[in-house]
Image (cartoon, helix red, strand yellow):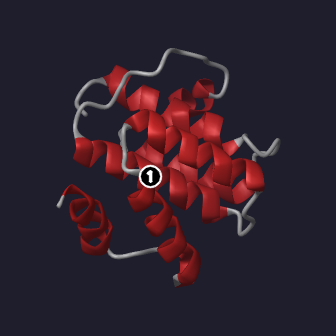
Amino acid sequence: MNTFEEKRSLVLEMIAFSTVDGHLHKREYEFLAIVANELGFEMNVFKDLFHQELPKIPIKSEFLRIQQFYRLALLMYSDGLLHQKESVAIQQIALEMGLNPLATKRILKLMNEAPNAIIDAEILLNVFQEQHN
C-alpha cells in the first residue's frame, strides 16, 4: 500500500464501516484518527474524508487484506458495543476481500474472547495460514 489513493480507500472503507450501525461513536472516531495518522494523513485531510465517497481500490496482497480486516474488526470493537449490523457487514466485507470465511469467523471469536479485543499478530496470521493447508 504505497499510494495516497490506496491509503485513502482504506480509510474511506473504515469510515463507511464505522457508521454501519447508524452512529459514529467517539471511540470509533478516535480509532479512525489514529489509523489515519499512522497512514500519514494530516488531520484536516482526515476530517475531509468524512465528506467523500470514492470508489474502493481493491487490495492486492493477502497480507494487506488481512491487515485491513483486522483494522475493521478492531474498529468494530472500539466502542464496546457489538451491533448485529456490524457483524453482518464485516463478514460481507471479508468475503468481498476474498478472505476465508472460516478464518474470519475464528478471528472474530478470538477477538470477542480477548481482553480489549486484541490478539497477537502471529495468531492472526496463523489462523489464515491454517486455512491454506
Quarter occupied by residue 127:
bottom left
Image: 60 above or below 78 = above
Quarter occupied by residue 23:
top right
Coordinates of residue 111 in the picture (x, y in percent): 51, 73
Quarter occupied by residue 62:
top left
Amino acid at pointer 1: Pro
Coordinates of residue 2 in the picture (x, y in percent): 22, 30
Quadrant occupied by the C terminus:
bottom left
Q: Which residue is drawn at 52% across and 82% down?
A: 114
* Total number of numbered discs in the rendering: 1
Judged from the image, the secondary structure of the residue bearing numbered disc 1 is: helix
Image: 103 above or below 29 = below
- In this rendering, position of residue 100 left or right of residue 88: left
* Res 105 visible: yes
Extreme-left residue of the structure: 133
* Res 25 visible: no
Q: Residue at x 48, y 76 (%)?
A: 110
Image: 92 above or below 74 = above
Extreme-right residue of the structure: 22
**Label 1 CA crowd tier, 10 Å (few <14, some 14–19, many 20+):** some
The residue beneath circle 1 is 101
Q: Which residue is drawn at 33% across and 76% down?
A: 120
Q: Which residue is drawn at 55% across and 48% down?
A: 91
Coordinates of residue 66 in the picture (x, y in percent): 34, 50
